Image (cartoon, rainbow, N blue to C red):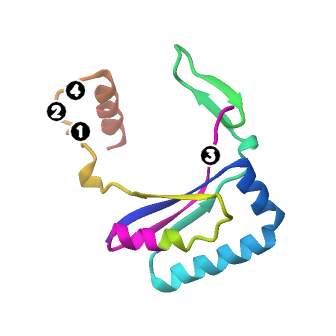
Amino acid sequence: MAKYMLIMRGTDETNAAMMASIDEAMAATRRFIGEMVEAGVLIAAEGLDDPGQGVVVDITGAAPVVTDGPYGETKELFGGYFLIGVASKQEAVEWAKRVPAVPGARIEVRRVAESDEVPQISPQAEPKSDAQATLQSNARVRS
């Protein structure tokens, strides 16, 4: 069973359309969540708060810079996700097609990498970079 994230992406226009009928949208979402629970595929689901309430930490320069709100030129915003456990990418796509969303919204389907697919650093291995040395040091502290 593979895990897939169904990422809800919206624009200012689709978010406004959803907010105009929020009670309807929430009822449809609750029904959809119920269907996923009944099918035994739902692992998690979360929606995000208004992007204007967040901050952006930009680490492209020498020191991190924190600014209010989303990126100024963002065309699509990550609004939330459903994490599901299904047998195939196609099954995940079929669930994504059923996500209650307003016209113009997009649902991105991404497989979640399994732990054996993520490079592991052996505590005995010689670090090849400063980042690996930091990870090894942190791993030793936790163990």
Could you tell which of marks 3 and 1 lies nearer the N-terminus?
A: 3
Residue on which disc 1 sits: 121
- Is mark 1 in CB contact (under 8 Å) with mark 2? yes
Alpha carbon of mark 4 to alpha carbon of mark 2: how far? 6 Å
Residue 54 in the image: x percent, y percent? 70, 40
**Residue that extends furthest to the left in the rendered view of this protein:** 125
Circle number at residue 127: 4
Relative to 77, is 132 above or below? above
Q: CA distance from mark 3 to mark 1?
A: 35 Å
For residue 125, which numbered disc appears in the image?
2
Question: Identity of the amino acid at label 3?
Answer: Glu
Q: Eyeballing the image, is 117 above or below 128?
A: below
Q: Position of residue 142 (x, y in %)?
A: 36, 42
Q: Amino acid at mark 1?
A: Ile
Q: Cβ–Cβ below 8 Å for labels 4 and 2?
A: yes
Report crowding for label 2: few under 14, some 14 to 19, many 20 or more residues within 10 A (C-alpha): few
Q: Is residue 81 left or right of residue 20?
A: left
- The boundaries of the magenta stretch are 72-94
| Secondary structure state at the residue bearing disc 4 | loop
Disc on the earlier residue, 3 or 4 = 3
Residue found at x 33% / y 33%: 135
Examine the structure image and report whether residue 47 is included in the region drawn in magenta. no
Q: Quadrant of residue 102?
A: bottom right
Q: Amino acid at mark 2?
A: Ala
Residue bearing the label numbered 3: 76
